[in-house]
Image (spheres, grey):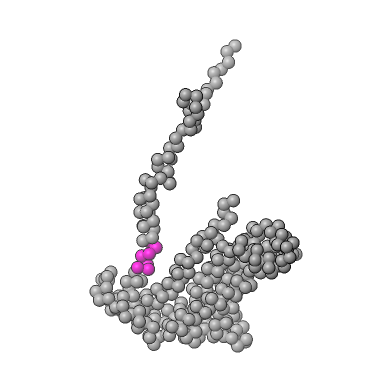
């Protein structure tokens, strides 16, 4: 009997030449994502994406240099016929709102809420990650549920509560509100980072004589620093852009933050759009600076744990 012929698989990965095994050249060698030929294409794609995201800011910048009549002109002009750089000076002296105090109020509320959130969420995240206490999962679930609520939903009850405490229309009230509504996110993200640190690290430090506070500050904080930066930047930006609660809690024009002060330039019969664009740029610049300073740590914090 003759055996059926066995089909030999073609050598696709390797071929023999003179007794030596040579790996076949990959078809991606000349046109892969890391080759020089794709660099111009990637640059063009990056420019297109950047242009799409920058167009609204460019429109605001150009509109801030226009007069009100030119902004409302039909058909519109894309480049100002007469540049009005004094708009950036006169908007600080408009009778609608004291912008200097509004900017100070925004900075104080955002920084205060960020610091308070960090002081409370940091030990809470460390404790929940290290101690297996009864009801731990239920506690973490309740913390997460608070993230689903928005200040606009509870603003009436919060106003009555702060009114009874005598701290309505104060920066302290807004610091407490912003800290409370950003506590859940900060606790959860830092909890994940603390949980990724081996418990043996804490035990080794305790054997050397360190107490719990020293283990947290000297050992764990340098290891979870990307997570802290992520929590800080998101809390700061959320507090900087908060609008609904500030509109109800803060009634004094000099204590209101920039998002609320911005609406004072928009009236029922007349709107100063050149000032709206200028104030919007002033409100954006600090956030952009913060992002530029800690961009690398923010990206590392968001992507940590995705690759093992």
Q: Is residue 229 above or below residue 258?
A: above
Residue farthest front in this picture = 208
Residue appearing at x 55%, y 66% in the figure: 229
Judge by depth and name the residue closer to the eye, 175 or 156: 175
* Residue 253 as seen in the image, left or right of residue 173: left
Q: Is residue 73 magenta?
A: no
Question: Which quadrant of the view contains residue 206?
Answer: bottom right
Determine the residue positioned at 24% across, 74% down: 81
Where residue 172 appears, as percent x and y from the top left, is 57, 82
Instruction: Work out whether residue 45 or residue 75 is closer to the camera in this orientation and state it.
Output: 45
Point 52% across, 22% down: residue:
7
Which residue is nearer to you in this view: 308 or 22? 22
* Residue at 58% over, 74% down: 115
Position of residue 194 measured from the top left corner of the image (x, y, whole percent): 64, 62
54 drawn magenta: yes
Q: Where are the magenta residues, as a range?
A: 52-58
- Quadrant that contains the N terminus: top right
Would you say the magenta stretch is mainly helix, strand or loop? helix
* Residue 261 image point, x, y percent: 44, 81
């Amino acid at each position: 009997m003759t055996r059926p012929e066995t089909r030999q698989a073609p050598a696709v990965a390797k071929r023999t030449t003179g007794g030596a095994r040579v790996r076949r050249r990959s078809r991606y060698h000349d046109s892969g994502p890391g080759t020089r030929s794709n660099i111009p294409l990637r640059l063009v794609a990056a420019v297109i994406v950047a242009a799409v995201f920058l167009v609204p800011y460019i429109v605001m910048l150009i509109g801030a240099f226009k007069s009100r009549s030119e902004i409302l002109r039909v058909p519109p002009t894309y480049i100002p016929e007469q540049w009005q750089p004094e708009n950036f000076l006169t908007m600080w002296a408009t009778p609608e709102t004291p912008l200097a105090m509004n900017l100070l109020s925004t900075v104080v509320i955002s920084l205060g809420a960020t610091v308070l959130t960090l002081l409370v969420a940091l030990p809470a995240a460390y404790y929940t990650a290290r101690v297996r206490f009864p009801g731990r999962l239920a506690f973490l679930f309740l913390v997460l549920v608070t993230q689903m609520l928005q200040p606009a939903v509870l603003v009436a009850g919060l106003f009555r509560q702060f009114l009874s405490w005598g701290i309505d229309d104060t920066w302290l009230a807004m610091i407490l509100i912003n800290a409370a509504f950003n506590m859940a996110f900060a606790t959860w993200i830092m909890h994940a980072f603390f949980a990724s640190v081996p418990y043996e690290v804490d035990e080794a430090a305790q054997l050397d004589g360190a107490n719990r506070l020293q283990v947290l500050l000297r050992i764990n904080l340098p290891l979870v620093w990307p997570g802290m930066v992520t929590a800080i930047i998101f809390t700061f930006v959320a507090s900087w852009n908060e609008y609904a609660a500030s509109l109800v809690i803060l009634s004094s024009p000099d204590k209101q933050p920039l998002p609320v002060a911005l609406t004072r330039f928009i009236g029922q019969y007349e709107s100063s759009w050149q000032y709206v664009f200028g104030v919007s740029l002033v409100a954006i610049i600090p956030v952009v600076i913060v992002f530029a300073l800690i961009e690398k740590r923010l990206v590392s914090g968001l992507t940590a744990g995705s690759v093992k």
